[in-house]
């Protein structure tokens, strides 16, 4: 029996598990909900021979690392997350439902179906008696959907010991997998002016909002969309009332690029814009932090991509690797020099919204792709990766 045929026999069980997981609210700060997902993962993986380690967190659910040893040489890490963006109560309001080929529900695409595909791929390999790996591990973090994260050092440290990282995010809506990503930096600026009565003596004020806006408009000169360099002014606020000249204003800007050098140069350009003296005496303070490093398509990633394309053709469908501006945990693994492929879950889309979905018809072929890719990587030497 082939892996794909075996997985077809498991589809109804998969759908029942998906209904169960989607019914669990697991927003990032729903600690109990995320840990219910972790409990399910632990109960499913332990009987397969996995050693489970959990990393408790103060505000979020645990991060979970499951490791299993085999008899081969390659070490492969599956990477996913248990958290969603949805508040408690969403699961009850929008339980899993089917519309044609689409399975809709909170977290279906991002990424409970992906977690299930990881589990089902592992189970299918175990049923086939496959253990030609040195280690086959799964890391599931609980804070992927927020900026303030504790899991990034764990992802980096864990990835260093592996030959390949396969990320369980959903495939693109057209079926593409992801082989490179932009990095992004969040650039923040605070402006300080002087308040005054807007009607009686506005001349005595120093308008922090106006000054900030003038500088923000200059950021457009740093963008180069053709080269993939983008800036988005995503937050701007300030002031207290319409009749007060505002003495405070702040903004947050998302900066993205495919190369670290381009990111660094763009951030430096933004800092220079706000470092120039202001004629009205407005003071600017800037800070920036890297939300995610770029993930370039290295030669090693290209080799993994070629293996995935080969497996897909053997399974009867075409596959393509693409670049995206979105950030994901694959970038942290790649930053450690480990080749990573992203988008190995089922096909889906409309993440984070009321119509988030995966395609039922993609579950078996995409899970088979993941299982056979693991097997093919293990057949290749570590040097080939």
Image (cartoon, grey):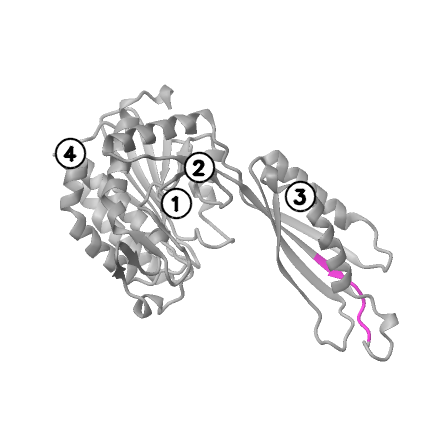
The reply to whether the C-beta atoms of the residues labelled 3 and 4 are less than 8 Å apart is no
In this view, the mark in front (1 or 4): 1
Whole-percent x, y for residue 229 in the image:
61, 41
Q: Nearer the viewer, residue 294 or 136?
A: 294
Q: Which residue is mark 4?
A: 2
Q: Nearer the viewer, residue 106 or 249?
A: 106
For residue 309, which numbered disc appears in the image? none
* Location of residue 240 (image quadrant): bottom right
Query: Which circle's residue, 1 or 2, is located before the other in the chain?
Result: 1
Figure check: 204 above or below 140: below
Query: Which circle's residue, 1 or 4, is located before the other in the chain?
Result: 4
Left or right, 40 with respect to 139, comes to left
Q: Nearer the viewer, residue 217 or 198?
A: 217
Whole-percent x, y for residue 332 in the image:
47, 39
Q: Alpha carbon of mark 1 to alpha carbon of mark 2: how far?
A: 9 Å
Residue interval drawn in magenta: 190-196
Q: Alpha carbon of mark 1 to alpha carbon of mark 3: how far?
A: 30 Å
Disc 1 is placed on an element classified as loop
The residue at the far bottom in this view is 200
Figure check: 29 above or below 54: below
Q: Alpha carbon of mark 1 to alpha carbon of mark 4: how far?
A: 26 Å
Figure check: 146 above or below 318: below
Q: Which residue is mark 1?
A: 172
For residue 322, which numbered disc appears in the image? 2
The reply to whether the C-beta atoms of the residues labelled 1 and 2 are less than 8 Å apart is yes
The residue at the far left in this view is 1
What residue is rendered at 50% in x and 33% in y? Answer: 296
Query: Which circle's residue, 3 or 2, is located before the other in the chain?
Result: 3
Q: Quadrant of the C terminus?
A: top left
Disc 3 is placed on an element classified as helix
């Amino acid at each position: 029996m082939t892996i794909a045929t075996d997985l077809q026999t498991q589809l109804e069980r998969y759908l029942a598990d998906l209904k169960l997981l989607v019914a669990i609210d697991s927003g990032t700060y729903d600690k109990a909900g995320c840990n219910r997902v972790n409990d399910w993962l632990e109960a499913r993986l332990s009987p397969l021979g996995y050693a489970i380690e959990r990393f408790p967190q103060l505000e979020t659910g645990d991060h979970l690392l499951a490791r299993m040893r085999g008899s081969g040489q390659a070490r492969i890490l599956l990477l996913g997350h248990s958290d969603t963006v949805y508040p408690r109560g969403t699961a009850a309001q929008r339980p899993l439902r089917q519309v044609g080929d689409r399975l809709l529900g909170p977290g279906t695409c991002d990424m409970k179906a992906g977690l299930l595909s990881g589990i089902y791929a592992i189970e299918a390999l175990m049923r086939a008696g496959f253990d030609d790996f040195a280690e086959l591990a799964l890391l599931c973090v609980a804070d992927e959907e927020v900026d303030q994260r504790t899991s990034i050092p764990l992802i980096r440290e864990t990835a260093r010991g592996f030959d390949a990282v396969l990320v369980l995010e959903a495939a693109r809506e057209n079926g593409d997998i992801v082989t490179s990503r932009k990095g992004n930096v969040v650039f923040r600026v605070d402006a300080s002016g002087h308040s005054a009565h807007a009607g009686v003596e506005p001349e005595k004020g120093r308008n922090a909002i106006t000054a900030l806006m003038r500088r923000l408009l200059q950021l457009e000169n740093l963008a180069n969309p053709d080269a993939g360099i983008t800036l988005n002014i995503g937050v701007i606020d300030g002031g207290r009332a319409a009749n007060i000249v505002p003495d405070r204003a702040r903004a947050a800007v998302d900066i993205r690029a495919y190369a670290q050098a381009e990111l660094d140069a763009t951030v430096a350009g933004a800092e220079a814009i706000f470092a120039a003296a202001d004629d009205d005496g407005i003071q600017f303070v800037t800070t920036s932090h890297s939300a995610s490093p770029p993930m370039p398509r290295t030669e090693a990633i290209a080799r993994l991509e070629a293996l995935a394309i080969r497996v897909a053709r053997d399974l009867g469908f075409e596959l393509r690797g693409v670049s995206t501006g979105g950030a994901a945990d694959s970038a942290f693994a790649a930053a450690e020099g480990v080749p990573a492929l992203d988008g190995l879950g089922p096909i889906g889309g409309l993440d984070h919204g009321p119509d988030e979905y995966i395609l039922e018809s993609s579950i078996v072929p995409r899970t088979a792709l993941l299982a056979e890719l693991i097997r093919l990587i293990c057949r290749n030497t570590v040097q080939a990766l």
